[in-house]
Image (tube, grey):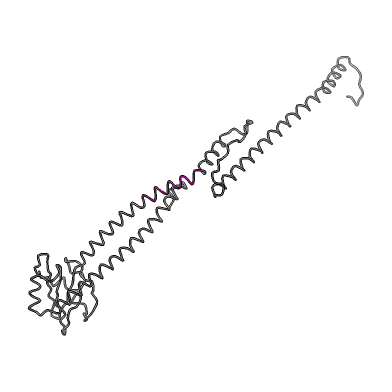
Amino acid sequence: MFNGARSLRSRLIIGSVALTGVAGVAIGAASLIGVRGFLVNQLDEDVTQTAALVRSLAADELQSRINGPGLPVGTVIAITNYGGSQAVYLDRRAHADRIEDSDLEGLRRTVWADNQAAQTFVLGDFGAYRMMSVSNKGDEHVIVGLPTLAVDRTVGRIGLFIMGILVAVLGAVAFATRKVIDIAVEPLTMMRETANRIAKLPLESSDLGVTDRVAIVDPDTEVGQLGRAFNHMLDNVDEALTARRVSEAKMRQFVADASHELRTPLTAIRGYSELTRRHNMDVSEDVR
């Protein structure tokens, strides 16, 4: 997941945004499910009221209600039996339009019972409906339904609104997380810069010391404790370099003193040797 984000800052930002996104999607999905369930329950109440109205009407009264005011727009009234199905749809002009038999296949295959809860059916091009049985007489069933289009539109709009809010929240979280991380990792950035400066010093061939140190803002935090340990390490390095320089100076002084002390007797021996050679002086076998 973080292969492309190499810096600690990028990983923390991506992790915060990802966690917030997952939480936002989960909350949004739960909210949509709850809202949809609430709206469907309200729609089922409307279907129940419409079914009660249809149940209370006689056949001629129902015909007049279908072609006139009294029923909600979009209401579907269907009659199914073993011989087939018939259904009408109340359009926006309050006119009853016939629904084709091919759109009623699902209604015919369903076993209907009195006081049965509303069910969802898709009636071809008319879309999804919540439908309920009004009356059962032998093999004949009178069924009433209302469209779920308003519910679907409302849930869709709420979903778009939640998505927009989530995008805005993720942007705000990314911005705020970056600012917080910039403040939190500033001591680490200072340590990196200090280490880079020290790494460029020619410590092996000069008498330079390690004088740079990291400023510690809050020593009680993890970053502060790391900075304190970093400074202690630099102190040890500087002391080691100083000890090395002192040791090298002592060694050079020792070599110089030894060279000086050995120079006089060696010169005398060389002089005696030259004198003996020039005057052909006899010397013992031991000296030879």
Q: Residue at the location (15% across, 76% down)?
A: 53
Q: Quadrant of residue 58?
A: bottom left
Residue segment shown in magenta: 171-186
Residue 210 picture location, percent across and down: 61, 36
244 is higher (above) or lower (below) than 68: above
User: 22 or 35: nearer the eye?
Assistant: 35
Q: Quadrant of residue 276?
A: top right
Residue 266 picture location, percent across and down: 82, 23
Residue 222 picture location, percent across and down: 54, 50
Q: Residue at the location (58% across, 39% down)?
A: 213
Magenta stretch secondary structure, dominant: helix
- The verdict on residue 249 being magenta is no
184 is higher (above) or lower (below) than 47: above
Q: Quadrant of residue 140?
A: bottom left
User: 37 or 129: nearer the eye?
Assistant: 37
Residue 204 picture location, percent across and down: 62, 33
- The verdict on residue 179 being magenta is yes
Q: Is residue 233 left or right of residue 48?
A: right
Residue at the bottom extreme, as displayed: 138
82 is higher (above) or lower (below) than 160: below
